[in-house]
Amino acid sequence: MKLNSEQLELILEIMDRGNFSAAARALNRVPSAVSMAIANLEAELNLKLFERSKNHLAPTEVTRSIEPHARLIVTKMRQLELHLTELSTGLETSLSIGVAADINQKFLLAGIEHLIQHFPLLNIEMVSAPQQELKTRLQNNEIDLYIAYSSSTIDVNERFRLLGVEKFVAAVSPKKAQQLKDHNKNELTMLSELRQIVIASKNYPLPDPRVLVSDACWYTDNLSMAINMVEHGMGWGNFPLSVVSEHFSKQSLVRLEFSDTTNGLDMPIHAIWQSYKPLSKTLQMLIELWIKQIEIE
């Protein structure tokens, strides 16, 4: 005999509820129908599924042995039914999302986690790369959307939505900070004399040339690598405060103090997609989740 998902669900409901009546209520059926269904199933399988007494109902060892498999099958069937509903309402089956290398990814993952709770079979590819590389990938239709900081120029081929604002701060190693203090160098212009660690790819133009302050620059396409390079005294970097605040607390980095200005630049974070492509329902939902959940100091 072949068991179907409805029969497995019935067995699990009885196990979870402890009796036929409670299982019947959960399944919107009458208790006699549930009792009869189990009796017929036991007869067809030639197996006893539940021990019955006047005041007690308990699963047999046979039922307990199939429980893990039954739960897995029922869960997968429910996910499949949900996925078919998603497809019927126009939701796509997969997304490819680009995230600029210097974005705090934790903010975005919270929104994605919430989305997949509603759509567990949705496949999501996450691509982390320098901002201009993501721009090229979007133009080549390799990704559906990317998250990056605002640029100094507007591209008419792109549309965007503001997600939040991140504060960028200039940071150096403790040793370098002490050297600057000893030489009484505390003005913003002194940064041009130091090597700057820039998160970008030399294969693509910078999205905003204003980020270059120093005459000498080293490049990396990875935020963690850039922070490590600055911690080891290889130069100074301009980093998201939400990321490097813990490094300030551990004193592996120092937030510079300037006598002529404040050390902090607010950078808007945008979701960006191609203007000729309408934003899909799933991406619309994800953007709304990001806006609600991203809280950046």
Image: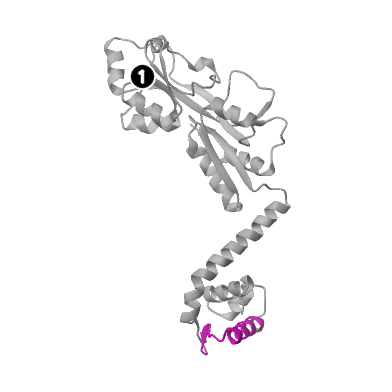
Read off the magenta span. 33-55
Would you identify the image quadrant in which residue 161 lies?
A: top right
Would you identify the image quadrant in which residue 132 lies?
A: top right
6 sits left or right of 55 in the view: right
170 sits left or right of 279 in the view: left
- Is 255 or 200 nearer to us in this picture? 200
Q: How many marks?
A: 1
177 sits left or right of 131 in the view: left
Q: Is residue 52 magenta?
A: yes
Which of the image's four quarters has the N terminus? bottom right
Q: What percent of the width, then of the height, locates residue 268?
A: 56, 26
Q: What percent of the width, then of the height, locates residue 94?
A: 62, 46
Query: Is the residue 239 above or below the residue 58 in the image?
Result: above
Task: From the image, tell me which residue sits under label 1.
Answer: 235
Q: How busy is the neighbourhood of tag 1: few (under 14 within 10 Å), some, or many (20 plus)?
A: many
Q: What percent of the width, then of the height, locates residue 271?
A: 61, 32
274 sits left or right of 228 in the view: right
- Is 101 or 185 nearer to us in this picture? 101
Its colouring scheme is: one colour
Q: What percent of the width, then of the height, locates residue 158?
A: 67, 27
Q: Is residue 190 magenta?
A: no
Query: Is the residue 115 above or below the residue 253 in the image?
Result: below
- Is 106 or 201 nearer to us in this picture? 201
Q: Secondary structure at mark 1?
A: loop
- Is 7 or 45 nearer to us in this picture? 45
Q: Residue furthest bottom?
A: 54
Residue at horizontal 56 percent and vertical 21 percent from the top: 207
Residue at horizontal 67 percent and vertical 31 percent from the top: 274
Query: Would residue 294 be visible to someone looking at this image?
Result: no
